Image (spheres, rainbow, N blue to C red):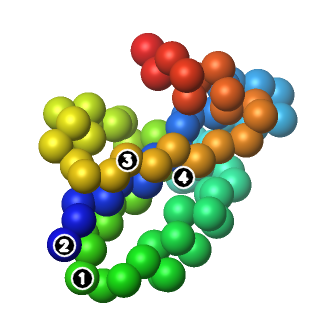
Amino acid sequence: MAEIILINPRFEISFWGLEHALSLIGKRSLLPVAALPLLAAVTPSRHRLTLIDENVESIDFARCAEADIVGVTGMVVQRAHARDPD
């Protein structure tokens, strides 16, 4: 059994992300990325899988350090934050 963590990095605040309007509709993210649930669906059940969408929750780096596999997905607009999560 492998401990697998898949991460979607935070989007930078922009006009197109509507971050300032999300609280008005009770949401924390506008467009969830479908890649993580898809990968979770095809991962064999014998593995322990954790999905982290940084637009919704913070990354637990201590837990990531203990995982067997950490995968990071993302789009071009997320590249800077994916490289430097500070």
Give the left or right position of residue 1, taking residue 56 as reference. left
Disc on res. 62: none
Distance Cα–Cα, label 2 vs label 1: 6 Å
Disc 3 crowd rating (10 Å Cα; few below 14, some 14-19, many 20+) is some
- For residue 44, above or below residue 28: below
Q: CA distance from mark 4 to mark 3?
A: 30 Å
Give the residue number, with chain letter if any, for mark 4.
26
The residue carrying mark 3 is 70
Identified by mark 3, the residue type is: Val
Q: Position of residue 73 (x, y in %)?
A: 59, 47
Q: In the structure shown, which secondary structural element does the residue marked by tag 3 occupy? A: strand
Query: SS class of the residue under badge 4?
Result: loop
Residue placed at 35% from the left, 36% from the top?
A: 58
- In the rendered structure, are the residues bearing label 2 and label 1 in contact, judged by CB atoms less than 8 Å apart? yes
Which circle, 2 or 4, is nearer the viewer? 2
Of mark 2 and mark 1, the one earlier in the sequence is 2
Quarter of the view holding residue 86 = top left
Q: Give above or below for 85 relative to 23.
A: above
- In terms of secondary structure, where does tag 2 sit? loop
Report the residue at 55% width, 22% height from top. Answer: 83
Tag in front: 4 or 3: 3
